[in-house]
């Protein structure tokens, strides 16, 4: 994929635009995993000063997409390997199904409506295998999970799930046409249980979704050595 795909819109060089452009490069692996991120080089490519580049990289470091070393500067984070993928899903299984059960006991109509909207629009923008095309789907997917955890009413649980940054790393690892339909169907099952305030069903539906998500990804990751 050419770097021009991530060029900024004309006459726009705001920090958010630079962040979006570099994020796209990382998600599409135009900046290869583990490689050095050249502040000056990418700034020239985007026709901006180094300052918004540095600001963007600070944000991306907080999201786990780049790593900073005092001696080497920034580099792109490595992709999850099979062991890391398995461990990530093990933690998600520990946190998210119980969170769905908690949410089922106290979720309100506004939160249910917001979740339904996310499910209804989850297949938008999935006609492109590059991040610019599937970004809206990835963001809605992440928002669905975050809203459920927030609805559980436990700030420590919410922070624990958010800090995993699971969806960012998973979509960087792999994206395939067709997963939107599967994901939306599984989300709808979770939502149906939440709507009935059925904690046991919500926990089971979330556990099933996470297990199926793992299987969809694991078959495309090299096995552990």
Image (cartoon, rainbow, N blue to C red):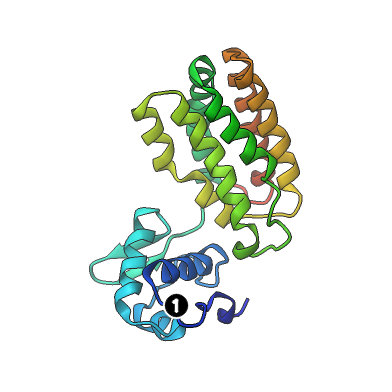
Q: On the rendered structure, is 53 left or right of 4?
A: left
- Residue 81 can be seen in this image: no
Answer above or below: position of 154 versus 56: above
Q: Give 109 or 55, whichever is nearer the viewer.
A: 109
Q: Quadrant of residue 120?
A: top right
Q: On the rendered structure, is 30 left or right of 128?
A: left
Q: Which residue is mark 1?
A: 12
Q: Which residue is found at the position 66% from the left and 38% from the top?
A: 119
Q: Quadrant of residue 121?
A: top right
- Residue 96 can be seen in this image: yes
Residue 129 is situated, as x and y percent measured from the top left of the image, at 69, 62
Q: Secondary structure at mark 1?
A: loop
Residue 98 is situated, as x and y percent measured from the top left of the image, at 50, 21
Answer above or below: position of 80 versus 153: below
Answer above or below: position of 223 versus 95: below
Pointer 1 local density, CA inside 10 Å: few below 14, some 14–19, many at least 20: few
Q: Give 81 or 59, whichever is nearer the viewer.
A: 59
Residue 149 is situated, as x and y percent measured from the top left of the image, at 47, 30
């Amino acid at each position: 994929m050419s770097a021009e795909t991530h060029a900024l819109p004309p006459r726009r060089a705001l920090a958010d635009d630079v962040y979006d452009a570099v994020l796209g490069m990382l998600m599409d692996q135009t900046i290869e995993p583990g490689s050095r991120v050249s502040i000056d080089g990418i700034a020239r490519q985007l026709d901006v000063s180094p300052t918004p580049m540095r600001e963007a990289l600070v944000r991306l470091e907080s999201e786990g997409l780049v790593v900073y070393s005092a001696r080497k500067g920034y580099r792109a984070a490595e992709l999850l390997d099979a062991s890391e993928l398995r461990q990530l899903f093990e933690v998600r299984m520990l946190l998210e199904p119980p969170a769905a059960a908690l949410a089922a006991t106290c979720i309100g109509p506004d939160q249910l409506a917001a979740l339904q909207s996310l499910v209804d629009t989850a297949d938008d923008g999935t006609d492109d295998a590059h991040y610019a095309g599937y970004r809206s789907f990835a963001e809605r997917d992440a928002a669905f999970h975050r809203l459920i955890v927030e609805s559980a009413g436990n700030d420590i649980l919410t922070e624990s799930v958010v800090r995993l940054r699971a969806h960012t790393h998973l979509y960087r690892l792999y994206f395939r046409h067709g997963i939107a339909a599967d994901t939306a169907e599984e989300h709808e099952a979770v939502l149906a249980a939440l709507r009935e305030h059925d904690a046991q069903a919500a926990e089971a539906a979330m556990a099933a979704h996470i297990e199926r998500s793992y299987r969809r990804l694991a078959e495309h990751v090299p096995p552990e050595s």
